[in-house]
Image (tube, coloured by chain):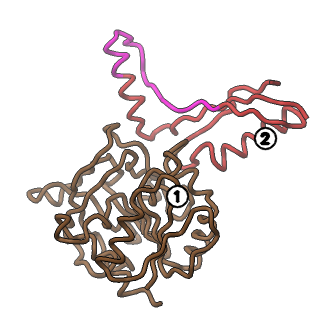
Chain colours: A brown, B red
Amino acid sequence: MKFGIVTFPGSNCDYDAYQAVVESLGEEAVFLWHKDHDLQQSDVIVLPGGFSYGDYLRSGAIARFSPVMQDVIGFAKRGGPVLAICNGFQIACEAGLLPGALLRNDSLKFVCEIVRLRVETSDTLFTNRYERGSILRIPVAHGDGRYTADAATLDKLEGEGRVVFRYVGGPGDADEWWSPNGSMRSIAGIVNDAGNVLGMMPHPERVVDPLLGSEDGLGIFESMLARVTV
Amino acid sequence: MSLYRIAVHIVPRRGILDPQGKTVADALHTLGFAAVKDVHIGRHIVVELDARDQKTAEQSTRDMCQRLLANPVTEDFEIASVEAA
C-alpha cells in the first residue's frame, strides 16, 4: 500500500509520517510536493503536522488553496482515505473536508505533552484495530487545537458515531471529559460523513515504536492497511 | 480603473469563546475600567486593489472575505471603510 505524504512549506511532521509508514508499518511512502498536481497513485493521503505557510491568517487557511490540495479534495470526494494530523486537521477543516474549525487553545499557550485519548468507535477505517473505549497514550503539540462547531454539528457528529477520539483525564478519572485545548465536548478527532477522512490533533505518527515511549499510534496505520483495498 | 483601499474587520462570532478577548477584559477590570462588559479581538486587514468603481471594489473584497479572509464557521466580517487610494 502506498501512502502519499503532502509537504507544504512549513510542514514538519512529514518525515515522521514517512518513518512511521516505511519503518514501523513496512509499507511504501512518497512525498507529494504542494505545488504539484500529482498524487503519484497513492492509496492513502496523509496531511501531516507542522505550520504550513507559517499559520498566517489562520492555521491551514492558505495551504487549503495549494495546487495539490485541489487533487486531495477530489481524491477525498471520490472516497479516497485521508489521514489529517494536527495542522493537517486544520487544513482539512479549512478545505471543507471536515466540519468545524480549530481555534486558539483556551489557555492561549502552545501545548506539548502526552495526553490520554479514548477510542470512541472502532467502527472506522482508521480505528478497527482498537477496542472501543481503549485509552491511547499519544502526544499533542499545537497552539490551535480547540475544536469548535455549532451545537447542531456536534450533535450530528455524536449521533452518527463520527467522534473518533476524545481527550480523557488521568487513569483515575478516565471517564471524565477533559481537554488540553478547550475543545468542545473534549473532541480530539472526527471523521467526515463518508468515513474516509480522519482529522485528529494528536500525533499517532510519533508513537509507533516502543523506543518512542509508546506504540499506541501504530494501530491507526494498521487499521488502514487492514481495510484499504489496493 | 482606480486604486481603492479597503479596510476589513474580522471578529470572532458572538458566542464563540474568545480567550484573548476575555484575558484583555480581565486586565482592563484590574486597571479599574469596571464598565467594560466584553472585549472581542479579531484582525484588521487592509486590501488595496484596482477596480472599476467603489461598488465593485467592495463586492470584490466581500468575495475575498467569504473565500479566504474570514472563516465562515467561526468569524464575522464587516467592511470598515472604502476609500480611493
Horizontal relation, residue B61 to residue B3: left or right? left
In front of the other: label 2 or label 1? 1
Q: Which of the chains bears the disc numbered 1?
A: A
Q: Is residue A105 above or below residue B5?
A: below
Residue that sits furthest to the top in the current view:
B32
**What's under tag 2, amino acid-wise?**
Gln
Please tell me which residue is depicted at 35% across the width and 27% down the height of the picture.
Answer: B23
Give the quarter of the image for residue B80.
Answer: top right
Horizontal relation, residue A181 to residue A14: left or right? left
In the rendered structure, which segment of residues is drawn in magenta? B26-45
| Front residue of A49 and B35 | A49
x and y, in percent, of residue A135 in the image: 19, 67
x and y, in percent, of residue A131 in the image: 22, 78
| Front residue of A90 and B74 | A90
| Residue wearing tag 2 | B59
**What quarter of the picture does the N terminus of chain B occupy?**
top right
Q: Which of the chains bears the disc numbered 2?
A: B
Say whether mark 1 and mark 2 are on the same chain: no
Please tell me which residue is depicted at 40% across the width and 46% down the height of the picture.
Answer: A144
x and y, in percent, of residue A172 in the image: 8, 57
Residue A150 visible in this rendered orientation of the protein? no
Per the image, label 1 sits on a secondary structure element best described as loop
Please tell me which residue is depicted at 57% across the width and 47% down the height of the picture.
Answer: B71
Residue that sits furthest to the left in the current view:
A172
> Is residue A223 inside the magenta stretch?
no
Give the quarter of the image for residue A167.
Answer: bottom left
Please tell me which residue is depicted at 31% across the width and 38% down the height of the picture.
Answer: A107
Q: Which mark is residue A8?
A: 1
Per the image, label 2 sits on a secondary structure element best described as helix
Residue A136 visible in this rendered orientation of the protein? yes
| Front residue of A58 and B27 | A58
| Front residue of A80 and A173 | A80
